[in-house]
Image (tube, rainbow, N blue to C red):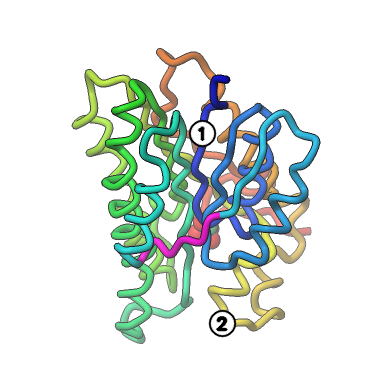
């Protein structure tokens, strides 16, 4: 029996990662949904029953080399075709001169170093399979900066640089490299984490905005770029709600 193509999605326990796992399982992938919170992953896996593909939970911490190595080991010999590097996040909303150094380190560690760690570990498996697709979730914060966004915008600019470097270095191989850069996406956790659990501050981000993007909207952009023919590479896709014409141009009613 031929195995279904495999896809790894990191940060899969909620939001964009969970929605992407679902979208790819619907397309027939065997999705390895990876994150730290296994209870959530198990619920996600159960929700995929009846789809063409399936979701398998895998406990992963992208800031831990041993954890990433264990994922790579589990995938040796598997037909891994897609890696969606989605684990990341913002952990403060402070001006640079008020910077909490540990928060900057954490932000860089998860968004940039964690991405390198994952991609470095899994690229040999894509190579062994003969073709593959690395999809990296950056952010419009990787394209422009804004006040009190320093730790996150710096990390996302770094992650974008990583993706662009990788595309140059993998040129000539059958591995596609795509950056998906969402703007305002309303998810359960992103803003709440950034504002350290302050739900009121988090909800202000989306106040009066008609239809911020959803996790499912972003998953659709990822799904579309993954399902394109192998010769068709989306280098970078910027997606925003209609109410957000630019980082600082948000229409609030
Ligand atoms: C999240 C988008 O505008 O909060 O990646 O930087 S923003």
Q: Give how far across and how far down residue 1 sits, in percent.
A: 57, 20
Q: Is 59 covered by the magenta stretch?
A: yes
Work out which residue is located at the far front of the displayed protein and give it.
Answer: 1
Position of residue 48 in the picture relative to residue 196 (left or right) = right
Q: Give, as a single range, the part of the protein colored magenta.
A: 58-63
Residue 248 in view of the camera: no
User: Which residue corresponds to mark 1?
Assistant: 6
Residue drawn at point x = 71 percent, y = 80 percent: 200
- Callout 1: 10 Å neighbours few (<14), some, many (20+)? many
**Disc 2 within 8 angstroms of ligand 1 (CB):** no
Q: Is 235 covered by the magenta stretch?
A: no
Quarter holding the C terminus is: bottom right
Residue 200 in view of the camera: yes
Q: Give how far across and how far down residue 246 sits, in percent.
A: 53, 48
SS assignment for the magenta stretch, majority: loop
Label 1 vs label 2: CA separation? 35 Å
Position of residue 148 in the picture relative to residue 37 (left or right) = left
Picture quadrant of residue 186: bottom right
Residue 21 or residue 233, whichever sits in front? 21
Q: In the figure, 118 relative to 52: above or below? A: below
Q: What secondary structure is marked by label 1?
A: strand
User: Which residue corresponds to mark 2?
Assistant: 196
Residue drawn at point x = 33 percent, y = 83 percent: 102
Position of residue 197 in the picture relative to residue 246 (left or right) = right
* Dots 1, 2 in contact, CB < 8 A: no
């Amino acid at each position: 029996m031929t195995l279904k193509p495999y896809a790894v999605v990191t940060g899969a326990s909620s939001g964009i990662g969970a929605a992407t796992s679902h979208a790819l399982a619907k397309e027939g992938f065997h999705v390895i949904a990876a994150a730290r919170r296994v209870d959530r992953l198990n619920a996600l896996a159960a929700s995929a029953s009846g789809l063409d593909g399936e979701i398998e939970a895998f406990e992963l911490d992208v800031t831990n080399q041993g954890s990433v190595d264990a994922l790579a080991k589990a995938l040796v010999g598997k037909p891994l075709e897609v890696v969606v590097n989605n684990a990341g996040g913002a952990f403060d909303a402070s001006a640079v001169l008020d910077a909490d150094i540990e928060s900057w380190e954490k932000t860089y560690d998860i968004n940039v170093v964690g991405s390198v760690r994952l991609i470095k570990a899994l690229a040999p498996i894509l190579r062994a399979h003969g073709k593959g697709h690395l999809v990296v979730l950056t952010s419009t914060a990787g394209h422009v900066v804004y006040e009190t966004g320093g730790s996150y915008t710096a990390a996302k600019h770094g992650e974008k640089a990583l993706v662009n470097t990788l595309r140059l270095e993998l040129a000539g191989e059958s591995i596609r490299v795509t950056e998906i850069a969402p703007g305002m996406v309303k998810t359960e956790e992103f803003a709440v984490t950034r504002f350290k659990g302050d739900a009121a501050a988090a909800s202000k981000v989306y106040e009066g905005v008609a239809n911020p993007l959803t996790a499912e909207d972003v998953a659709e952009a990822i799904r579309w770029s993954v399902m394109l023919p192998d010769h068709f590479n989306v280098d970078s896709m910027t997606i925003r709600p209609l109410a957000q014409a630019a980082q600082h141009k948000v229409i609030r009613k």
